Image (spheres, coloured by chain):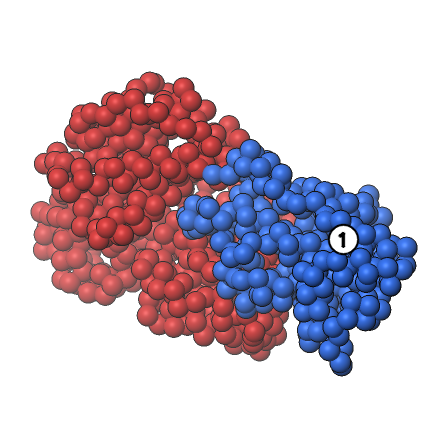
Chain colours: A red, B blue
């Protein structure tokens, strides 16, 4: 069973029916393990939402496989989407000695994996666990991810308050085993916030998810803030790490900032060195977002500052593959036929106003980014298969469009692989307007192919 | 991906019940086992299928049964009819499966195990033996799914990497029709009795059971659960058959204990 990769943070297996010692070996095969290993996920979970029966043998066999992955990838492993009865069964099977994690829902797991996107200022998380150690541990982990844990002393209070507005999550029936030591991250509009803690030394480079950071840069994020309010101090190795990160980000016009660092406890020379490499310091997250430079980058879309990059022969050679992947995917999703209208090398030029868009970058043997843009009506039709019904909700459509561009890139990746070209793909990104997309791809010249899907315009854009 | 026209064309290709089979079923309905054996003997394919099934370990007959009359008298009218429906399903099964990673021998093994346990559940519930054929008819769903998605396995694989989509969900989203409707249509083409068709349709777990007769609802829940008991077997997991439709745990919860008692899953 192939796992579904959720926001490049969680690999999720969703078996159906019965899970026992007889079939557990078949659920996660060697192929599936290598598929997980090729990702940079920080959690591998088995969802029990469609499992009606499981026994200790089945769980033990699954855990043996998951533990191998945990050892190799230093990730969090466990289960999610269970009932109260199933949750209790874990404690019964393992006599309260549980070394894996249990998350009541996949969304709660995503909260701990640091894959949630902040949409508003309310970041309160209601929390209850009968075990006081777990309660404190979960509160700390939630706090470390930039949220405000509101801990309830008992189940009655928890259930009473869980119905109230004002909490983005109500966390209960959740158990934290060994967690991955990846540095937590979350996105807030066009900014990526990383949460640091303790004394920072050379291990920060191991704990930092560089693949995720690189993906964010490639899809156009240009604001990165390190929340250092819980950092005691740092040594030269950590300072060098941030300095290198800032230099590497300069190619993309990225701004890296550190907020909340206690300057009294950090050698002055380190701070100067970091400032020389382009890192900005702020007293707090609030000051960071209030800064004029930050605001000027934060207000609009993050732009890719890669003017020096040009279309190369290998990228142009891959164009037919990318285009056919996009066409076949859209035709498969809509049962509609595409008519090619024209192709030109030019900066991204929207055919009509009011289009939605999504892009995804790729890197490896060839580097670049593909973007799709189409009117909302076509997004609705195209994404009906992913959403389940024709929806008018812009957020739902934007997510589905991101998923669509992810499918297109996944298909192209496989086709390129068959021809001996290896690429990796980043997280997709969606745009609710063509202006936002145009700002992200900047003035870079790329190949624009315009199509018509039964009178709906559709643009495919490939840029270096 | 899959268009309603392609589905219509597929349904048109499903053969009606052959004359020999119709006569055999008519004889069984009137309780005349000898006439049924006589009618069945006109179709050697049917006799071969019945011999293979009744002589399998699941049926547990001590001696090998080869004669049509012996087969029908050993099975009895209701079980024989059940096997005839399974035979019809095996007739529309592909020579080589294209979507599911299995062959016809594996499919027949699945049918036998599925029907065998369904018989145990029917007996445990003391239900009408006319419902015995439900598992056989439901097994047609896998055949239909393989025919419809055989040419689209790479598209399905791509979609399944991005979300938890079973084949039925994909089919419903692209063509607004589910396997429950397709199996229902095929069963009607074969003149399967209406209560049996209705039970099979309910057992897909897509429609609410409330408002149905209590006993029918229980049987539908049990059949849905049994289907996934079988589809959770290693061979069928390996074949990809577990993702045929979406398992509905809530639908099965009211009958979980009955199922455990009858099938002894613990």
Q: Residues within 10 Å of mark 1 (few under 14, many from 20)?
A: some
Badge 1 element: helix
- Tell whether B2 sits left or right of A157: left
Residue at figure coordinates x 33%, y 40% from the top left: A325
Chain of the residue that carries numbered disc 1 in the rendered image: B
Residue A328 in percent (x, y) is at 38, 37
The answer to whether residue B1 of the structure is visible from this angle is: yes
Residue B42 in percent (x, y) is at 75, 58
Residue A140 in percent (x, y) is at 42, 59
Question: Looking at this rendering, what residue extends furthest in the front direction?
Answer: B42
Residue at figure coordinates x 34%, y 45% from the top left: A411
| Quadrant of residue B178 within the rendered picture | top right
- Tell whether B21 sits left or right of A389: right
Task: State the residue position of label 1.
Answer: B20
Residue A128 in percent (x, y) is at 56, 58
- Tell whether A252 sits left or right of B14: left
- Tell whether A213 sits left or right of A399: left
Question: Looking at this rendering, what residue extends furthest in the bottom direction?
Answer: B62
Split into 4 quadrants, where in the image is the C terminus of chain A?
A: top left
The answer to whether residue A261 of the structure is visible from this angle is: no
| Quadrant of residue A404 within the rendered picture | top left
Q: Can you say whether A373 is above or below A14 in the image?
A: above
Residue at figure coordinates x 63%, y 60% from the top left: B228
């Amino acid at each position: 069973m192939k796992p579904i990769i959720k926001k490049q943070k969680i690999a999720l297996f969703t078996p159906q029916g019965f899970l026992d010692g007889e079939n557990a070996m078949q659920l996660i095969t060697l192929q599936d393990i290598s598929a997980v290993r090729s990702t940079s996920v920080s959690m591998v979970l088995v969802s029990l939402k469609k499992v009606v029966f499981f026994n200790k043998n089945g769980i033990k066999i699954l855990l043996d496989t998951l533990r191998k992955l945990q050892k190799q990838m230093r990730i969090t492993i466990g289960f999610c989407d269970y009932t109260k009865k199933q949750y209790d069964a874990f404690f019964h099977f393992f006599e309260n000695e549980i070394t894996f994690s249990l998350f009541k829902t996949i969304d709660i797991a995503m909260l701990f994996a640091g894959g949630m996107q902040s949409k508003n200022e309310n970041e309160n998380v209601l929390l209850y666990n009968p075990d006081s150690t777990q309660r404190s541990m979960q509160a700390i982990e939630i706090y470390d991810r930039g949220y405000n844990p509101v801990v309830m002393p008992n189940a009655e209070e928890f259930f009473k308050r869980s119905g109230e507005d004002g909490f983005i999550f109500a966390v209960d029936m959740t158990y934290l085993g060994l967690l991955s030591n990846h540095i937590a991250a979350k996105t807030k509009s066009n900014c990526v916030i990383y949460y640091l803690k303790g004394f920072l030394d050379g291990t920060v480079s191991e704990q930092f998810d560089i693949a995720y950071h690189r993906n964010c840069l490639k899809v156009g994020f240009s604001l990165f803030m390190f929340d250092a309010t819980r950092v005691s101090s740092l040594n030269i190795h950590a300072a060098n790490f941030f300095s290198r990160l800032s230099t590497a980000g300069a190619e993309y016009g990225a701004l890296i900032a550190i907020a909340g660092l206690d300057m009294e406890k950090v050698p002055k020379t380190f701070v100067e060195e970091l400032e020389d490499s382009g890192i900005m310091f702020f007293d707090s997250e609030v000051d960071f977002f209030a800064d004029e430079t930050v605001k000027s980058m934060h207000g609009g879309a993050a732009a890719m500052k890669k003017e020096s990059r040009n279309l190369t022969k290998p990228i142009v050679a891959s164009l037919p593959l990318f285009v056919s992947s996009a066409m076949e995917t859209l035709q498969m999703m809509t049962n509609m036929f595409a008519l090619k209208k024209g192709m030109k090398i030019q900066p991204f030029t929207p055919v009509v106003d009011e289009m939605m868009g999504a892009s995804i970058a790729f890197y490896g043997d060839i580097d670049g980014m593909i973007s799709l843009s189409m009117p909302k009506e076509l997004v609705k039709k195209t994404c009906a298969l992913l959403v389940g019904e024709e929806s008018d909700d812009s957020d739902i459509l934007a997510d589905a469009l991101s998923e669509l561009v992810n499918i297109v890139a996944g298909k192209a990746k496989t086709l390129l692989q068959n021809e001996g070209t290896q690429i990796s793909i980043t997280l997709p990104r969606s745009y609710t307007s063509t202006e936002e997309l145009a700002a992200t791809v900047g003035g870079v010249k790329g190949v624009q192919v315009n199509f018509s899907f039964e009178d709906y315009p559709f643009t495919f854009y490939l840029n270096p | 991906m899959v268009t309603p026209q392609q589905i219509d064309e597929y349904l048109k290709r499903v053969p009606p019940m052959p004359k020999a089979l119709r006569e055999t079923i008519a004889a069984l309905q009137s309780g005349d086992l000898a006439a049924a054996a006589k009618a069945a003997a006109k179709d050697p394919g049917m006799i071969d299928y019945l011999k293979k099934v009744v002589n399998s370990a699941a049926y547990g007959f001590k001696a090998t049964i080869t004669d049509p009359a012996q087969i029908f008298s050993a099975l009895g009218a209701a079980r024989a009819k059940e096997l005839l429906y399974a035979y019809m399903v095996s007739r529309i099964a592909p020579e080589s499966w294209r979507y599911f990673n299995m062959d016809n021998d594996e499919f027949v093994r699945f049918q036998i195990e599925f029907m065998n346990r369904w018989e145990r559940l029917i007996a445990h519930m003391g239900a009408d033996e006319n419902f015995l054929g439900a598992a056989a008819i439901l097994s047609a769903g896998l055949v239909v799914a393989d025919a419809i998605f055989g040419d689209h396995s790479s598209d399905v694989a791509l979609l399944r990497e991005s979300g938890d989509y079973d084949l039925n969900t994909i089919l419903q989203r692209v063509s607004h029709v589910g396997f429950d409707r397709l199996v229902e249509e095929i069963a009607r083409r074969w003149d399967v009795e209406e209560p049996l068709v209705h039970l099979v349709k309910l057992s897909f777990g897509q429609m609410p059971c409330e408002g149905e007769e209590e006993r029918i609802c229980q049987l539908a829940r049990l059949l849905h659960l049994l289907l996934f008991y079988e589809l959770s077997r290693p061979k069928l997991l390996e074949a990809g058959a577990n993702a045929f439709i979406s398992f509905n745990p809530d639908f099965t919860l009211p009958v979980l204990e009955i199922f455990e008692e009858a099938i002894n899953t613990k």
